[in-house]
Image (spheres, rainbow, N blue to C red):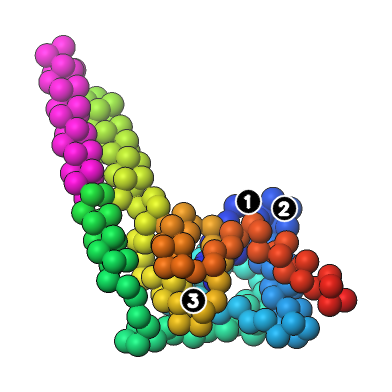
Amino acid sequence: MDTTAFTDNKLRDVYGEGDLSKTVDYLLDIIAKSRIKLNMSCHMPPITYKEFSEYMARYECPKEVMIKSDTWIVKKSPNRYDTKIPSEIFYEYVQDMRERMNKGMRISENAIWEAAVESLVMMSRGEKKSQIEAEVVGKAITDFRKRYRLALRKGTLDSAPDLDVLLLAKELKAGVVAADEGIKVWAERLGLRFLSAKSFPKMMREYLKYYE
Protein backbone atom coordinates (compact mmCIF):
# COMPACT_ATOMS: atom_id res chain seq x y z
CA MET A 1 0.00 0.00 0.00
CA ASP A 2 1.14 3.50 -0.84
CA THR A 3 0.59 6.49 1.44
CA THR A 4 -2.02 7.80 -1.01
CA ALA A 5 -4.14 4.70 -0.34
CA PHE A 6 -5.07 6.46 2.91
CA THR A 7 -4.54 10.15 2.22
CA ASP A 8 -6.27 10.70 -1.13
CA ASN A 9 -8.66 13.65 -0.86
CA LYS A 10 -11.47 11.76 -2.62
CA LEU A 11 -11.50 9.19 0.18
CA ARG A 12 -12.13 11.83 2.82
CA ASP A 13 -15.35 12.98 1.22
CA VAL A 14 -16.71 9.44 0.96
CA TYR A 15 -15.53 7.80 4.18
CA GLY A 16 -14.54 10.53 6.61
CA GLU A 17 -16.90 13.48 6.15
CA GLY A 18 -13.91 15.44 4.92
CA ASP A 19 -11.76 14.47 7.91
CA LEU A 20 -8.46 12.64 7.32
CA SER A 21 -8.31 10.91 10.72
CA LYS A 22 -11.84 9.52 10.39
CA THR A 23 -11.05 8.26 6.91
CA VAL A 24 -7.87 6.48 7.99
CA ASP A 25 -9.64 5.01 11.03
CA TYR A 26 -12.40 3.64 8.78
CA LEU A 27 -9.90 2.08 6.37
CA LEU A 28 -7.91 0.53 9.22
CA ASP A 29 -11.09 -1.05 10.57
CA ILE A 30 -11.63 -2.72 7.20
CA ILE A 31 -8.00 -3.87 7.09
CA ALA A 32 -8.25 -5.29 10.62
CA LYS A 33 -11.46 -7.22 9.86
CA SER A 34 -9.94 -8.58 6.64
CA ARG A 35 -6.85 -9.73 8.52
CA ILE A 36 -8.86 -11.56 11.20
CA LYS A 37 -11.65 -12.98 9.05
CA LEU A 38 -10.05 -13.43 5.63
CA ASN A 39 -6.36 -13.74 6.52
CA MET A 40 -5.58 -10.88 4.13
CA SER A 41 -2.64 -8.67 5.10
CA CYS A 42 -1.85 -5.15 3.96
CA HIS A 43 1.86 -4.39 3.68
CA MET A 44 3.88 -1.20 3.54
CA PRO A 45 7.63 -0.76 3.13
CA PRO A 46 9.13 0.94 6.24
CA ILE A 47 10.16 4.01 4.23
CA THR A 48 6.58 4.35 2.97
CA TYR A 49 5.15 3.85 6.45
CA LYS A 50 7.47 6.59 7.73
CA GLU A 51 6.13 8.90 5.03
CA PHE A 52 2.58 7.96 5.99
CA SER A 53 3.23 8.51 9.74
CA GLU A 54 4.82 11.91 9.16
CA TYR A 55 1.90 12.96 6.97
CA MET A 56 -0.58 11.93 9.67
CA ALA A 57 1.44 13.74 12.33
CA ARG A 58 1.21 16.99 10.36
CA TYR A 59 -2.58 16.67 10.52
CA GLU A 60 -2.45 15.90 14.26
CA CYS A 61 -3.95 12.46 13.88
CA PRO A 62 -5.13 10.98 17.22
CA LYS A 63 -2.73 8.62 18.95
CA GLU A 64 -5.32 5.83 18.92
CA VAL A 65 -5.46 5.85 15.13
CA MET A 66 -1.68 5.68 14.83
CA ILE A 67 -1.56 2.75 17.27
CA LYS A 68 -4.16 1.01 15.11
CA SER A 69 -2.14 1.65 11.96
CA ASP A 70 1.03 0.36 13.62
CA THR A 71 -0.86 -2.78 14.63
CA TRP A 72 -2.61 -3.70 11.38
CA ILE A 73 -0.28 -2.45 8.64
CA VAL A 74 2.52 -4.97 8.11
CA LYS A 75 5.89 -3.26 7.67
CA LYS A 76 8.32 -5.11 5.44
CA SER A 77 11.30 -4.02 3.40
CA PRO A 78 11.46 -5.34 -0.16
CA ASN A 79 14.31 -7.63 -1.09
CA ARG A 80 16.03 -5.19 -3.43
CA TYR A 81 18.85 -7.61 -4.28
CA ASP A 82 16.87 -10.68 -5.30
CA THR A 83 13.69 -9.13 -6.74
CA LYS A 84 14.07 -9.34 -10.50
CA ILE A 85 12.93 -6.52 -12.80
CA PRO A 86 13.00 -7.06 -16.59
CA SER A 87 15.71 -5.01 -18.29
CA GLU A 88 13.08 -3.66 -20.71
CA ILE A 89 11.31 -1.98 -17.79
CA PHE A 90 14.56 -0.36 -16.67
CA TYR A 91 15.19 0.82 -20.24
CA GLU A 92 11.68 2.29 -20.49
CA TYR A 93 12.13 4.13 -17.19
CA VAL A 94 15.45 5.68 -18.21
CA GLN A 95 13.98 6.68 -21.58
CA ASP A 96 10.94 8.20 -19.87
CA MET A 97 13.10 10.22 -17.46
CA ARG A 98 15.33 11.43 -20.28
CA GLU A 99 12.31 12.72 -22.21
CA ARG A 100 10.98 14.41 -19.07
CA MET A 101 14.33 16.12 -18.40
CA ASN A 102 14.45 17.41 -21.96
CA LYS A 103 10.91 18.72 -21.58
CA GLY A 104 11.86 20.32 -18.27
CA MET A 105 14.81 22.06 -19.93
CA ARG A 106 12.54 23.49 -22.63
CA ILE A 107 10.12 24.72 -19.99
CA SER A 108 13.03 26.39 -18.16
CA GLU A 109 14.22 28.12 -21.32
CA ASN A 110 10.74 29.37 -22.17
CA ALA A 111 10.20 30.66 -18.65
CA ILE A 112 13.48 32.62 -18.75
CA TRP A 113 12.67 34.14 -22.15
CA GLU A 114 9.13 35.13 -21.14
CA ALA A 115 10.32 36.73 -17.91
CA ALA A 116 13.17 38.53 -19.67
CA VAL A 117 10.90 39.99 -22.37
CA GLU A 118 8.28 41.15 -19.87
CA SER A 119 10.98 42.70 -17.67
CA LEU A 120 12.51 44.60 -20.60
CA VAL A 121 9.11 45.94 -21.63
CA MET A 122 8.39 47.17 -18.12
CA MET A 123 11.87 48.71 -17.83
CA SER A 124 11.32 50.59 -21.09
CA ARG A 125 8.20 52.08 -19.50
CA GLY A 126 10.23 53.27 -16.54
CA GLU A 127 8.73 50.81 -14.04
CA LYS A 128 10.55 50.39 -10.73
CA LYS A 129 12.71 47.33 -10.03
CA SER A 130 10.53 46.30 -7.06
CA GLN A 131 7.42 46.36 -9.24
CA ILE A 132 9.09 44.28 -11.95
CA GLU A 133 10.18 41.71 -9.38
CA ALA A 134 6.70 41.52 -7.92
CA GLU A 135 4.75 41.34 -11.18
CA VAL A 136 7.13 39.44 -13.45
CA VAL A 137 9.70 37.46 -11.49
CA GLY A 138 7.32 36.20 -8.79
CA LYS A 139 4.70 35.13 -11.34
CA ALA A 140 7.35 33.53 -13.56
CA ILE A 141 8.69 31.43 -10.69
CA THR A 142 5.22 30.27 -9.66
CA ASP A 143 4.24 29.33 -13.23
CA PHE A 144 7.58 27.64 -13.84
CA ARG A 145 7.33 25.47 -10.73
CA LYS A 146 3.84 24.34 -11.69
CA ARG A 147 4.76 23.43 -15.27
CA TYR A 148 8.10 21.88 -14.30
CA ARG A 149 6.52 19.70 -11.60
CA LEU A 150 3.83 18.56 -14.03
CA ALA A 151 6.39 17.66 -16.68
CA LEU A 152 8.85 15.81 -14.47
CA ARG A 153 6.71 14.18 -11.77
CA LYS A 154 3.22 13.38 -13.03
CA GLY A 155 2.82 9.81 -14.23
CA THR A 156 6.21 8.49 -13.14
CA LEU A 157 8.08 7.22 -10.09
CA ASP A 158 9.66 10.16 -8.33
CA SER A 159 10.49 8.88 -4.85
CA ALA A 160 12.06 5.96 -2.99
CA PRO A 161 8.77 5.11 -1.17
CA ASP A 162 7.00 4.74 -4.54
CA LEU A 163 9.69 2.37 -5.83
CA ASP A 164 9.71 0.30 -2.64
CA VAL A 165 5.93 -0.18 -2.88
CA LEU A 166 6.33 -1.71 -6.35
CA LEU A 167 9.33 -3.84 -5.40
CA LEU A 168 7.52 -5.24 -2.37
CA ALA A 169 4.41 -6.01 -4.39
CA LYS A 170 6.57 -7.74 -7.00
CA GLU A 171 8.31 -9.80 -4.33
CA LEU A 172 5.06 -10.82 -2.58
CA LYS A 173 3.13 -11.25 -5.84
CA ALA A 174 0.58 -8.87 -4.38
CA GLY A 175 -1.61 -6.10 -5.68
CA VAL A 176 -0.79 -2.41 -5.33
CA VAL A 177 -3.17 0.10 -3.74
CA ALA A 178 -2.56 3.79 -4.45
CA ALA A 179 -3.99 7.02 -5.80
CA ASP A 180 -0.73 7.89 -7.53
CA GLU A 181 -0.70 7.96 -11.34
CA GLY A 182 3.00 7.14 -11.52
CA ILE A 183 2.61 4.04 -9.36
CA LYS A 184 -0.36 2.97 -11.47
CA VAL A 185 1.57 3.32 -14.74
CA TRP A 186 4.61 1.39 -13.57
CA ALA A 187 2.63 -1.24 -11.64
CA GLU A 188 0.83 -2.11 -14.85
CA ARG A 189 4.10 -2.20 -16.80
CA LEU A 190 5.46 -4.64 -14.23
CA GLY A 191 2.38 -6.83 -14.61
CA LEU A 192 1.12 -6.11 -11.11
CA ARG A 193 -2.52 -5.84 -10.16
CA PHE A 194 -3.39 -2.22 -9.40
CA LEU A 195 -6.26 -1.09 -7.21
CA SER A 196 -7.19 2.56 -6.93
CA ALA A 197 -7.46 3.97 -3.42
CA LYS A 198 -11.13 4.64 -4.09
CA SER A 199 -11.99 1.08 -5.17
CA PHE A 200 -10.00 -0.72 -2.46
CA PRO A 201 -12.51 -0.23 0.42
CA LYS A 202 -15.39 -1.31 -1.81
CA MET A 203 -13.60 -4.49 -2.78
CA MET A 204 -12.74 -5.35 0.82
CA ARG A 205 -16.32 -4.74 1.95
CA GLU A 206 -17.54 -7.05 -0.81
CA TYR A 207 -15.19 -9.82 0.36
CA LEU A 208 -16.30 -9.36 3.99
CA LYS A 209 -19.98 -9.36 3.04
CA TYR A 210 -19.75 -12.95 1.79
CA TYR A 211 -17.81 -14.06 4.85
CA GLU A 212 -20.38 -12.60 7.21
Residue at the spot x=36%, y=65% of the render?
159
Q: Position of residue 68 (x, y in %)?
A: 67, 79
Residue at the spot x=41%, y=62% of the render?
189
Tell me the residue that label 3 is attached to. 169
Quarter of the image where the C terminus is located: bottom right
The kind of secondary structure element at disc 3 is helix
Q: Does 6 sit above or below residue 144?
A: below
Give the alpha-carbon distance from disc 2 to disc 1, as whole Å. Answer: 7 Å
Q: Nearer the viewer, residue 1 or 121?
A: 1
Q: Determine which of the numbered discs, if any, sits on residue 14 in the image.
A: 2
Residue with the most extreme top position? 125
Residue 145 appears anywhere in the view: no
Q: Position of residue 3 (x, y in %)?
A: 52, 66
Q: Are marks 2 and 1 in contact (CB under 8 Å)?
A: yes
Q: Quadrant of residue 4?
A: bottom right
Which of the two labelled residues, at mark 1 and mark 3, occupies the earlier sequence position?
1
Residue with the most extreme right position? 212
The kind of secondary structure element at disc 2 is helix
Q: Position of residue 8 (x, y in %)?
A: 58, 56
Residue at the spot x=40%, y=52% of the render?
155
